[in-house]
Structure formats: C-alpha cells, structure tokens
Image (cartoon, grey):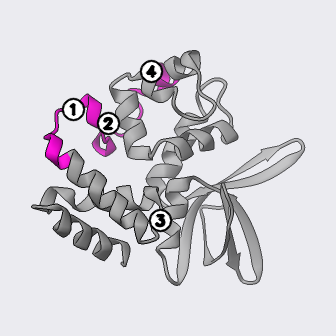
Amino acid sequence: MYEYIKGRLEFIGEDYVVIDNRDIGYKIYTSGESIAHLKTELEKVIVYTQLIVRDDDMSIFGFATKEELKMFQLLTTVTGIGPKVGLGILSSIPMNQLIGIIISEDIQGLTKAQGVGKKTAQRIILELKEKVDHKLAMFEPTLIPKVETVDGDKEEAVSALVALGYTKVEANKAVDYVKDSCKNVEEMIKKALKFLSK
C-alpha cells in the first residue's frame, strides 16, 4: 500500500519512529540501524515501508534504505519468522553483517540475534543463502583475516565517537565507511565525524 513515507522525523522510540506527513503521524516500526541513519537527516526523511495486515492489527514496518527493507522481506519469508522477529534480527545485527553471517553459514553468529535459536538460524541460512545480495555482505572480523592494529584503531575511534555523543551503531557505521582510507586513529575519527555530519 505504501512504497515509502516522506516527512519530518517527529519522535524516536525504542523500535519505532513517528514521521509527520501533512499533519498525520505515521508510527513505523524499524531497526536500530535505520534509526541511527534517520537521526542524521536534518530536514525531511524518507522511510521505505511495508504495511503488515493481520486480523487484529495493522502495522507499518519501514527502513532507511531499500536494501534493508528487502532484507526484512526476505527474513519474513522464512518459516516461523514474523515481522517482529524479523525486525528483532535486524536490530540485533546490522544488515550487511547479517548477510555475511548467512553467506558464511555462521549459525552461532546468527543465534546472537534476538529471537533466533539454532533451528531457526539453520532455516534462515538454508532458505536465504542464495537469495541475499552477496555484494552487500560484510563479514565479521573473526571470519576474515585482518591486521590487529586496524581492529585496535577501529575500537579506539568508535570509543571516541561514542564519547562525543554518537550511538555505537552510528560510530561503527561511520568508522567502517572511512577506515580503509585512513592511516591512523586521528584521521579515522576526523573522517568519521565528517561522514556523520552529512
């Protein structure tokens, strides 16, 4: 019914936002990653949505990017995963990292997500491994070799950004975006701040 909703970010809840569009406040359930992204938008925000209709309820689920919405839609095609569990998974694990976990068949990593046990994790991997966008995958540090000093620098930069008032999700996203082009922690922090100020 709704492809997207565009308007002013009026309120942020624990797992939802309220978008004001022409004096109507739309309550949209969303992930922590999308909330962090939307908070950086200064004027109008756009949320890509899906209306979920049940016998006793009608809810809007939405995300800051089309890619995250598509991931949510894929998750909810898996047997036993409803909208709330799908949202819980995306709030527990950032989308790109989630795709990496699915591709690498990391059952243990997937069980860290809210509401996911071993059997559910196995179903997700079995049903979605060939459907997810492999180009968007971001693998956990334990799954790919990395230089230890880079990980240490990243942690230091993230801690500095958190100390400046950003959430850990925002800080991680910004540092991941800039770290490959940085020579040291100071440069990483500066570029991350520039990214967050956009």
Q: Which mark is residue 107?
A: 4
Dot 3 or dot 1, earlier in sequence: 3
Q: Position of residue 119 (x, y in %)?
A: 57, 15
Dot 4 or dot 2, earlier in sequence: 4
Cα–Cα span, label 3 and label 1? 26 Å
Q: Is residue 73 or residue 140 the one in the foreground?
A: 140
- Number of residue marks: 4
Label 2 sits on what residue type?
A: Glu
Q: Is residue 103 at least partly visible in the picture?
A: yes
Q: Position of residue 114 (x, y in %)?
A: 60, 35
Looking at the image, the residue that sits furthest to the right is 56
Q: Is residue 48 or residue 157 the one in the foreground?
A: 157
Dot 2 or dot 3, earlier in sequence: 3
What residue sits right under mark 2 in the picture? 140
What residue sits right under mark 3 in the picture? 37
Q: Position of residue 69 (x, y in %)?
A: 53, 50
Q: Position of residue 141 (x, y in %)?
A: 27, 36
Around disc 3, counting alpha carbons within 10 Å, would you say few (fewer than 14), some (14 to 19), or many (20 or more)?
some
Cα–Cα span, label 1 and label 4? 16 Å
Q: Secondary structure at mark 1?
A: loop
Label 1 sits on what residue type?
A: Ile
Q: Is residue 163 or residue 197 the one in the foreground?
A: 163
In the picture, the quarter occupied by the C terminus is bottom left
Q: Which residues are magenta?
A: 124-150
Q: Secondary structure at mark 4?
A: helix
As displayed, is residue 186 above or below residue 104? below
As displayed, is residue 193 above or below residue 125? below
